[in-house]
Amino acid sequence: MPRNTLQSRLFTPFVVRTSAVVLSTLLISFSTKAQQLGLEPTRAQHAMVVTIQHDASDAGLAVLKEGGNAVDAAVAVGFALAVTYPVAGNLGGGGFMLIRDKHGKTHFIDYREKAPAAASRDMYLDAKGNVIPKMSLAGYKASGVPGTVAGLSYAQKQYGKLTLAQDMAPAIRLATEGFVLSEQEAHLLESKDMSKFPSTAKIYQRSGDFYKAGETFKQPELAETLRRIAKDPTDFYKGAMAKQIAAVEKAGGGLITAEDLAGYQAKDRNPIKGRYRGYDIITAPPPSSGGIVLVEILNILSGFDLPKLGSDRSVAQVHYITEAFRRAYMDRGDYLGDPDFNQLPLKQMANMKYAAAWRSSIDPTKPTPSKELVRPSGFMPPPPQVTPRKESTQTTHFSIVDKDGNAVSNTYTLNSYFGSGVLIDGLGFVMNNEMDDFTSKVGVPNVYGLIQSAANGIEPGKRPLSAMTPTIVTTHGHWFRHGKLAYVMGTPGGSTIITTVANDVISAVDNGLNIQQVADAPRFHHQYLPDRLDLEKKFPVDVADQLRTMGYTVNRLAVADEKNPGVWGDSELIAVDPKTGELLGGHDSRRDFGKAAGY
């Protein structure tokens, strides 16, 4: 965002106390900034698709050129990634699609997985009440009822312009004719977790004869499954395919039945909305924790003039942002779960007076230890007496804007790499291990280390709490007119999703980075517990050292090997030039096989 557009931003004045420690760091910026200044976004006049996999980007663009809208393109990308990015793209998982149409109307399609009817609170505990290692992560009992096919087909039927068959044609072609693997993509197929399941290893690893870069990967079973879905998506939930899925689950000791599949429905929910620096934030509601936690973070930070504290990724900015992360994640852990099963204090969490109370507790000179953090009184209901746990990183996000200004931000997942590892024989896709996102035992962290409350406990038909945060940012509108589209944002990354999206918003809106610089900026994360500041490996060493001196416990990922970037997340972003209306795409360069594609 050009600097002159920031001069009119709205923020609540707040007196920031500084010390010699902070003053000495105000001008320190991350060491790669000089390189970043040369990074330019992909530009397009009419439409833009940004995904982690170039064939999927092309699939979405092709549908747009055929006359489809942003939702048609999203459906095309969603099914294409199930072919070209099986690590996270999926038929056997679930996710969230945020839609904003050209008139400013918004929709949030929740196609998150659900617990099977036979699921129970203590299903992953042994006779002594201890969590059985890996049981919620691998194998047949790890899967929730998948929602992707229901969600994508619902979106197409309700909001698309073309037919489902037209939207799915690129994915069917990619599965039938194959696509050429890059070195990174071939390496992903060598997952040891898949090797434990012969049917899965046969499809993705040729039973040990691993694919190499430059080879064409064809998936005939998956191609036929996609043809059947294109003809009749209800077959996946109530027809022959549903029976096939249930039979595989039963044979392996899983819990998903034909009745579970028949009872699955995607839900059209109201997005969470907030405001920041004169922009409207449109984002994910529960069962995502992402949107409300994002809004709470930005509310806390709205009282600080961040650019005056220092440049993007300066010590001072990182300190204040981290302290906002810490406080919002404390609330995430105590209160959030499936809104169909719990009363959630969303209004209280979004209250600006509550944010101001949290803000006043931030010490400008040092971090607040999480064990000493005290929630401001008088705003929130009493938290549950017991506290919950964590979420997986293998998710994927894509962003789309069409020629009419319709926008889609979509994040979907299998949870871990290749989900549960279980392949549905004859249908050619793997199932999720999304049951690990529930609280297996209160107080025990999940695979992402998150502590969660009893509100996220396992119950039949319940959707697990997620950190996925598809987000759309617009200029602030008024009662008689809607604002203008500004950004489409999102990322994978498990518990780091929310902090990455927050940093992306801050880097663009506060710090004026272009959208490619935003996608590539070094990442940092704090989630209240464990009380640790995680820094991406590419984060500058001097800033990390000064944060440690301030009192943070700093974990700089893969620091022992300076040649290994040690990354998390994958921001796929779109910005709209406020002067020209040109679309600017930012593909995260951490993955070399994706792209921003536009025309």
Image (spheres, rainbow, N blue to C red):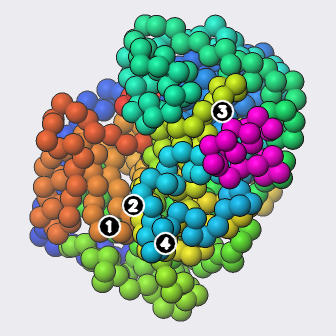
| Boundaries of the magenta span | 242-261
Residue picked out by circle 3 = 424
Residue picked out by circle 2 = 449
**Residue 479, quarter of picture:** bottom right
On the image, the x and y values in percent for residue 511 come to 38, 48
Distance between the alpha carbons at the discs numbered 3 and 2: 29 Å
Amino acid type, residue under disc 3 in the picture: Ile
Look at 69% across and 38% down and name the residue there. 248
Of callouts 2 and 4, the N-terminal one: 4
Asked whether 376 falls inside the magenta stretch, the response is no
Q: What numbered label is drawn on residue 530?
A: 1
Q: Does the image show residue 173?
A: yes
Q: Secondary structure at mark 2?
A: loop
Look at 48% across and 16% down and name the residue there. 206
Check if mark 4's residue and mark 1's residue have beta carbons within 8 Å: no
On the image, the x and y values in percent for residue 204 come to 51, 22
Number of marks in picture: 4
Distance between the alpha carbons at the discs numbered 4 and 1: 28 Å
Q: Secondary structure at mark 3?
A: loop
Check if mark 3's residue and mark 2's residue have beta carbons within 8 Å: no
Q: Nearer the viewer, mark 4 or mark 3?
A: 4
On the image, the x and y values in percent for residue 260 come to 78, 52
Quarter containing the C terminus: top right
Of callouts 3 and 2, the N-terminal one: 3
Amino acid type, residue under disc 4 in the picture: Ala
Residue count near mark 1 (Cα–Cα under 10 Å), binned few <14, some 14–19, many ≥20: some
Amino acid type, residue under disc 1 in the picture: Pro
Q: Nearer the viewer, mark 4 or mark 1?
A: 4
The outermost residue toward the bottom is: 378
Look at 81% across and 38% down and name the residue there. 243
Residue count near mark 4 (Cα–Cα under 10 Å), binned few <14, some 14–19, many ≥20: few
